[in-house]
Every structure is written in C-alpha cells, then in structure tokens.
Amino acid sequence: MSEGGSGTVGEFIQGEEEPSSSWVVLAFGLVTSLALLVLHGILYPGRDLPVISEILPMFDGVFDSGIWFFILGVMGGVFAIIATMLTEATSE
Amino acid sequence: MGDVLTSLILFWGLMLLTYFLMQNGLSIFNDVTKAMSHFMLEKALGPGIDLVEGRDGSASKAWFIQGMLWLIAASTLVFEGLWLKQDPTALHSLSAWGYDPTANSLIYASNYAALYGGIGMLLIGSSLHIMPRLAGTKLASERNATLVSFLWTLSVLVLVVAAHDSEILGVNIFLIGTGMHVLGFIAIVINLLLTISERQSALPIPGWLIILGMLADPISTVATIITGSIQTGAGQWLLAHMIGGTFFFATTAGVALYASSSASGNPLWSRSLGAATLVGALATINPIGDSNGMMAADMLGITFQQFQPSSLDSIVIAFLMALAMIPIMALAANIMMTLRGGDAFIENSDSAGITEMNLGASMLLPLAAASLFVQSDALAAAPELSGMAPTLLLMGIWLVLVPISLGAALHLFPAVTGRNLLSRNRARWAYWMMGGGALLGLTVSMMSDLIDMALIEAAVDDSSALAADVQAVGAILFYGAAVGAIMHTLNAVSGLFRGARVNTDRATSSSITTEAYSLASPTSVRKILAGGASLDTTVVPVGESDDAGSATEL
C-alpha cells in the first residue's frame, strides 16, 4: 500500500447494515450455553442450577423447571415471526 | 382369509378402479361432474370464497407458511415430550390452567402436528404448484385451495388438542377434527382431479405418485371400514401404515422427484424406478410408522385395539413389509442420482432445499430397514423392541418426511411467491440446526430407550436414573430442531416481503463472482466448483509468466 493510499486504514469502521445471519450466531450460542448448563447439572447432580422461579421469586411455582428456559426461547422466536409479519406488512 | 389380506385386496381393487376412471373419465357424466365440482369449489361457498385472493401461487404460499408454522409447534411438542420423559413434573404449573400434559400425550400430539400440520401442509402446498405444471394447465380453483388451508389448520389444531384430551364436555373432539380434515381433504383432491382432467399431455410419474397417494388415503380408510377390519388391532395398524405408505410416502415421493429434478436442472434419473416406487407404494406395506394403530382408531372414533395379528396376517404383513424395501430403495436412489446428475455431486447453491432433500433421501433407507426390524418384532407374541418404536417413528418423521417436504417447499418457494428466501446463509444455518438437532437429539433419545430396555430386562430396581440423564441430553439436542424451524419460518416470512425478486441477480457470499473465474494455473473442475463457481460461470484463462514478480503499482 502506498503512503498516499486510503485514509481509512487504521480507523474503526462500523457498517450500517446488519448481516442477516448474525443473530443466528447469537441463537446458536444461547442454545449451546443452555445445553452445557444442563450438562453441568448431569455431571454434578447434587448442585442443581437455578431455575427462573429461583432467580425471579414472583414466578415461584410457575417457572420451576429448566424446561421453561427453552419454552421461553421458542416463544421469543414465535413473537419474532409475528413481529416480522406485522412490521413488514405495515412498512412502506 | 385374514383381515389384512381382505382389506388389501379391496384396496387394490378400488385403486385400480380409480386409475381406470381417471384415465377414461365418467363417460356422459363427465361435463356434469366437472361443472358441479367447480360450482362446489367456489360459488357454493358464497361470500366466504371472497375472503381470499386467487392469484397464481397464493394457495401454495398459504399452505407453505402454515406448514412451516406447524413445524415450530410440532418440534416444540417433541422437545417437551422428550424432556418430560426424564422430568415428568416439569410442566406441572400448567395444571392450574387445566393443562396437564405427559410425555406420551405431548409426543402423540406432536405426531399430529408434524404429520398433518407440517408435512401434510407442505406436501399439499407443493402439490398445488406441481400438478398444474405437470398437467400443462392452471389449478382449478386457487381461491378454494387457499381457503381450505385455514380449515386444515383448524382441523390439525383440534386433533392436537384431542391428542391431549379426546373428550371435552362429553364430546369426542377427535371426530370433529377428523370431520374438518376430511372436508379439507376432499376439497383438495377434487381441486387436483379437476386440474389434471384438463391435462394437455400424459401425466409424468411424479404426478401419478401425488394424485394416487392422496386418493389412497380415503380409499384405504373405506376399504378397512367396509371389510370390518378397522375394529381389530391388525386392521387399525394396517390403516395407519397404508396411509403412511400412500399419502405420506407416495405423495412425498412425487414431490421429491419433481423437486429434485427442477432444483438440480437434471432430468429424472430413471422412469422405471419412478414406476417401481409408484406400484410399490400402493402394493406393499410401508414399515415406517408406529407399532400400533392408535392414530387410525382415534381419528375414526373407535375403540383402540392392541396389535395382535393372526398367523396368516403376520405372514402377509411380514412379506409385504419386506417387499416395501423395493420402492423405498428405488425412491432413495432416484432422488440422489437425479440431484447428482451424471457427474460428481454438485450442489445448486441457489436452492436451499437441495440439502434438505438430500438429507431425507440419505436417511430413508437406514430408517426403513430399522423400522422393518421393529415392526417385524411387533408381530411376535412378546415384542422386545417396542420400547424404541416411538423414537424410531419420530426419526422417520423428522429425518425423512420433514426434510424432504420442507426441502421441496424451500426449493419451490421462489417459483410460488416470486421472491427468494431472505437469506441463503440463514437457510443453511437453519438446515444444520434442524437436521443436526433432530439427528443427534433422537439418536441420543434412542440410546436412552435402549438403556431403559436393557436395565428393565436385567431387572434393575431403579432403572430410570441413567436413562433419564441421557434423555435430558437428547431433549436439549432436539431443541435445535425447534430453533431451526423458527429460523426457516422467519427466513420465509421475511422473504415474502424483502426477498430478492426471482428475476433479479442476488449477491453471493463467495469471493469468486459467479460470472467469471480466473484460471491462473491448471486445476481440477472440483476445485473450481468448491471455490464458489457455478455451472454458468465463465472460466477465463489468465496468462502465466516465469518472470520475477515486483510490487504492484497502484
């Protein structure tokens, strides 16, 4: 590269558009984390990981199983689909 | 003569009669029947038919999107069912709302959601696109097919509720769900029959697979009812497997053969194998399915009977199940060879569905062989492999039928909607999540089943602990299928609005442009293709020189 080249070299650049697959990485990471957390519970059976109702006492007696982490994930996905439908249908 | 053979002979006779009538028509009643059917499909519905649009592809689009949504529900139900196998009280908090699911009820409900909601809707959506093209005409009633998709969804919803609790306020709601299902099914079959009655040329093999697969569903039901075998365990088992081998297997085969050819650009590899698949699907008993006929009995509102076939029935079943490997092998080979073409396997990077169909075709034969062993074992007086039958059924659904039907739908999506899926990358990710989650999750679940069976056989007091730990891992791995289903659906829904139009070029993620590939040194075609070039890429030779290099001047 010549000295009179682009002045952007060495500067921080942030794109305007989000790659479509970026949130996939987040979802994959989340699922992997949850899987490893449950694996922890299997490897150390005497030390169960906290469930939602232990973290948020207002949900005591409701979200008192690890399955709710996953069900809430699916609900989040379904709401994302509904939100996409609504926003796409109403956008100009 | 046994129940099974009697029902099969009647079924074969009715199918031959149907084929004859489809080829030769109804003589002087032809015009009257057609006119009346057209009237029933549209005008007889009054203002209701105006609720939906009748543009080309609108019916397939409605069936595709609803089918994908059902896959999310089905995968979630399977995940919950697998989880509850090791933690039965995980969802006890829902009992406050009157919902008290068990592992069995959740997996049973998931079978309805996956088979009739996901797979059924995707197959019918594909068929509504494929049949008019094979017949060289237009769909008889686009609006009716669109409207019926909502009726079908409602029927699946009722069946899923009924799978948890079949009686509500003293009414068997299975019958309500079945009634709506039959109504929708009849409308779709009439629509397709009217479409192919206007065909401009002979119907190719995939078309026959689709239409005969659909017609065989009600015909097999009628055959078992007329012979009275539906009241026996063997008859109920037979009906479940006849519907599995015709509506699900034959229709899937027709859709897959069409899609594999149109996605890869290769002609159908073998017409003979296609014909063998068609005849074999109708003449044999497909082993993939449950080891009892509970679904058939429940949907018809009759008392479920245990599967205890007579010796003659056992011989007929064993013989016809073994013969079923012929159409299964023929289909798997035909799909894979058509996708591959005459050369090394070349993926069409424009089609997200090819990888899904390839997965389904690859898993077809091993799962059919495994199912054959389990179903043959079920014929014995004391079955030993029944513990793994439910998981094997889930594998058949999620590793064969779902990938093939979803793959075909993903491939046909641009042709149906006029837009591509939003992101090819997201489709690829979704494939890995869904396929990997289902394969690993159900394999681990089957390991849990085997542990359970072995410990019970060894008379271990507390046999549940070890199997439960393994089952937990299986459930979590299967969660990937739910995430994959959500990603596929989101990709399709976004594609409906923002996907690149079919007639415009799309940006590629490869560093090599699709238009030109600069060939600097001798290399193999495989390496060029692996580098991202497609069949339409122009290979441009670049001159070589042995001169010493120097800095590039900018």
Image (cartoon, coloured by chain):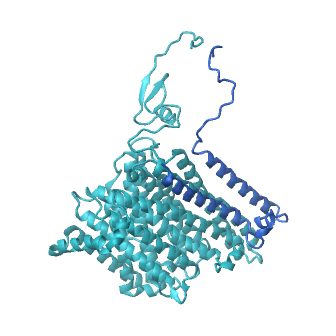
Chain colours: A blue, B cyan
Residue sitting at x 59%, y 72%: B107
Q: Quadrant of the C terminus of chain B?
A: top right
> Above or below — where is B538 with respect to B101?
above
**Residue A14 quadrant:** top right
The x, y position of residue B132, in whole percent, is 30, 58
The x, y position of residue A64, in whole percent, is 76, 70
Observer-nearest residue: B346 or B109? Answer: B109
Observer-nearest residue: B26 or B544? Answer: B26
Which residue is most to the right?
A46
The x, y position of residue B329, in whole percent, is 43, 59
User: Looking at the image, can residue B364 be seen?
Assistant: yes
**Residue B502 quadrant:** top left
Residue B167 horizontal side relative to residue B404, left or right: right
The x, y position of residue B397, in whole percent, is 52, 65
Observer-nearest residue: B253 or B56? Answer: B56
Residue sitting at x 41%, y 44%: B501
Which residue is most to the bottom?
B170
- How many marks can you see? 0
Residue A73 horizontal side relative to residue B392, left or right: right
> Above or below — where is B550 with respect to B266?
above
User: Looking at the image, can residue B287 be seen?
Assistant: no
Q: Quadrant of the N terminus of chain B?
A: bottom left
